[in-house]
Amino acid sequence: KLEGSKCKGQLLIFGATNWDLIGRKEVPKQQAAYRNLGQNLWGPHRYGCLAGVRVRTVVSGSCAAHSLLITTEGKLWSWGRNEKGQLGHGDTKRVEAPRLIEGLSHEVIVSAACGRNHTLALTETGSVFAFGENKMGQLGLGNQTDAVPSPAQIMYNGQPITKMACGAEFSMIMDCKGNLYSFGCPEYGQLGHNSDGKFIARAQRIEYDCELVPRRVAIFIEKTKDGQILPVPNVVVRDVACGANHTLVLDSQKRVFSWGFGGYGRLGHAEQKDEMVPRLVKLFDFPGRGASQIYAGYTCSFAVSEVGGLFFWGATNTSRESTMYPKAVQDLCGWRIRSLACGKSSIIVAADESTISWGPSPTFGELGYGDHKPKSSTAAQEVKTLDGIFSEQVAMGYSHSLVIARDESETEKEKIKKLPEYNPRTL
C-alpha cells in the first residue's frame, strides 16, 4: 500500500480567490454572476469551514485556478474554478471553499495533481482517477470529451502508479518500477514520444494527434558537445514534474532529464529548442553533483542538488532575460529546502523554520507579505506574516498560495488562531 505524506496541519491560503478571473482579462459570460466573488488575500488566512480538519497534502498547479487538499484520513477535497468539472463534484459549478469529493470518499487518496483544467488523484492501491477537461485526452480515458465532471478511472492496467504530474493539457504518471507514461496534448514534444503530434487537417488547419491513453516514454538521450545523440540506458524514474508545456524527471542515479517547450531556456540545455524526447541536463551528471528534488514552474525549472543547493533555469518574468542553464539561487544558499512551489511567475519555499517567497509584479497576494507591505519582490524574502508558523508543505496555483501550517504545540495552535479567517461570500 502506498503511504500518503506524514505531514499534519491546518490549511492557510493567500493570493487571488476570484477563481474565474485568474489569468484572464474578464470573467467569461457564462460565469458573469460570479464576477465580484473572491478578493485578493494579501496575507495568510484560515478557511472558516475547515476548523478541525487536519491536512496532510495541498495541491494546485502553476496553470491552475483550482486547488485540492488531502486530509490525514486520505479524503480528497477540492475548490475553485470548475468550468470543465475539474473539481470532481459531478457538475461545473464554481466552489468557493474546500469541499469533499463524494465520488472518491470510499477511496484512500495519497496524492493528486492539477493541470490547467483537469485533475488526477492517486489511491493507496496505486490506481488513478481523473476528471475535468479531456479535449486533448489529458484524462487518459481513451477518448476526447470537453468535460468529465465525476472521477473516472484512467485506462491503464500496468504496475501500480506511485507518482503523477500535470502540465497545462497533458499528464504524466510513473509506476513503482520507475517507468514513465504520458498522455494528452503533444504540441511541443512534452509527452516525450519523439513527436509534437502536429498534422495538417482539412482547410490547412493544424491539429494534434493526442495520446488518449497512457503511453510509455521509451527513450532517454544525451547530446554530446559535438552534437552526437546517445541513448541513456536503464533510466529508472524516481520523480516527475511538469510546467505548462515541459517536463522534468529525476532518476535513481540523481540525474535530471527535461523535454518539451524550449522557450526561455526552461529545459536547461543552453538553447531554446523544443526537445521531443527526455534529454539529460548536463549540470547534474557529475559524482556528488546530482539532484535530490525537482520542481517545475509555468516557464521555469528548479532542482535541489544532493548537497542542498537550489538551482534555477528558465524565466519567471518573461519580459526579462532568461536563464538558459541551471544556476545556483544565491539568495537561498545555506537554507534546507523542504518544499517549493511555483505559480505563473511567483515562487514560494518552505525551508528550515521559515517560509520564503518572491515574484515580479503584478502579484495578487500570493507572496503573502501582508496588507500594507510591498506587493512584489525580485529577491527572495521571508514571509513575516508566517513568523513562528512552521510550513510543512507549500503549493501554488496560477496566482494563489496554499500552506500546511504545523499545529503540534500549543504555541503553534495559538499563532495559527491569530491569523484572520477567510469566509468567502457565496451566491
Image (cartoon, grey):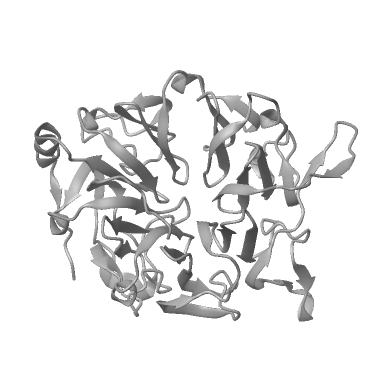
The quarter in which the C terminus is drawn is bottom left
**Tally of numbered tags:** 0
* Quadrant location of the N terminus in the rendered image: bottom left
Indicate the position of residue 236 as horizontal and vertical percent values.
Answer: 66, 48
Question: Residue at the location (59% across, 81% down)?
Answer: 143
Near-viewer residue (189 or 371)? 189
- Is 389 left or right of 298, judged from the image as shown? left
- The image quarter containing residue 284 is top right
Whether residue 286 sits left or right of residue 227 in the image: it is: left
**216 horizontally vs 33: left or right:** right
Q: Residue 80 location, x and y as percent? A: 32, 62
Q: Residue 146: horizontal and vertical position, in percent?
A: 51, 79
* Viewer-proximal residue among 373 and 266: 266
Q: Residue at x 44, y 53 (%)?
A: 61
Q: Is residue 78 above or below residue 10?
A: below
Residue 274 in sight in this render:
no
